Amino acid sequence: MQDACRTRAVLDIVGDKWALLVVRVLKDGPLRFTELKRAIDGISQRMLTVTLRDLERDGILTRTVREVMPPHVSYELTSMGRTLREAAAPLLEWSIAHLPEIDAARAAYDDRP
Amino acid sequence: MQDACRTRAVLDIVGDKWALLVVRVLKDGPLRFTELKRAIDGISQRMLTVTLRDLERDGILTRTVREVMPPHVSYELTSMGRTLREAAAPLLEWSIAHLPEIDAARAAYDDRP
DNA sequence: CGGTATCCTTGGGGATACTG
DNA sequence: CAGTATCCCCAAGGATACCG
């Protein structure tokens, strides 16, 4: 499987604990830092910053600063980011659809020696 | 975003360093432990075992033991596992298709203060 | 508001050795 | 062949405090 190493590189994006969640939340248009933080339950300020920087570096989203007081920074998916969002959608839908089944499988598994 | 917590649960599967790679490799039918290890470049024996156990527990694959000498254990996707594989396919294809673009974005990003 | 900086803990995961 | 068992390390990431 010669694609393994290449696939791994993107699983480093996808597998990121928060990245896909950020991409998902941005699907309806740009959001500000605080809006993102509110939208993504449980993310720390530090991890949101780190995740946004990584995604910006990878060309998934853009960071736009308005130099006013108080500061105004908004994040928006790039065209590549939107294609990622589309590619990831089936998986996210699968996850929501199959969560009960997975929970049941775990319970069944844990009920045996 | 009330789905965040639910989506997170599956990102714990997806985000697993090796899980999707295992699912992907199993798409053409059952494989034995050693075959999986050979097919997934860079995975350690320990992590393959751990990943397989987790996926079995989640109902993604089955583990079948033939009690012979030497032992013969094969792993195969369940029907749910196959739907996961299908849901994940677009993302894996996206990853392979956009890797050059991501590399370029990173290089560009790193070339600035 | 939108971050940095710092500290600190946890557990993911590699290497190695042994076994039914 | 298909694992367990151990040891060990480092980096992901949370908490907290401070800043332009």
Image (cartoon, coloured by chain):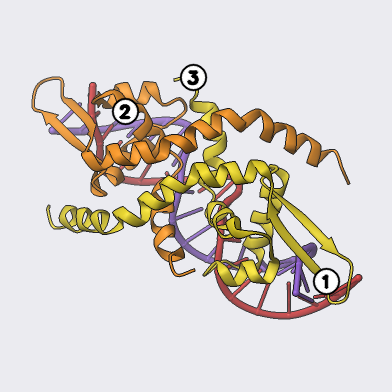
Chain colours: A orange, B yellow, C red, D purple
Q: Position of residue B2 (x, y in %)?
A: 49, 19
Marks 1/2: CA–CA distance: 49 Å
Q: Chain of mark 2?
A: A
Q: Residue at x 48, y 38 (%)?
A: A91
Which of label 3 and label 1 is nearer to you?
A: 1
Q: In the picture provided, is A19 more to the left or to the right than B85?
A: left
Residue A88: name its quadrant. top left
Mark 3 or mark 1, which has the lower sequence index?
3
**Figure check: A57 above or below C20:** above
Secondary-structure class at tag 3: loop
Marks 3/1: CA–CA distance: 46 Å
Q: Chain of mark 1?
A: B
Residue A78 appears in the rendering: yes
Q: Nearer the viewer, residue A37 or B75?
A: B75
Q: Amino acid at mark 1?
A: Pro
Q: Nearer the viewer, residue D10 or A49?
A: A49
Can you identify the residue that label 1 sits on? B71
Q: Position of residue B4 (x, y in %)?
A: 48, 26
Q: Which mark is residue A27?
A: 2
Residue A45 appears in the rendering: no
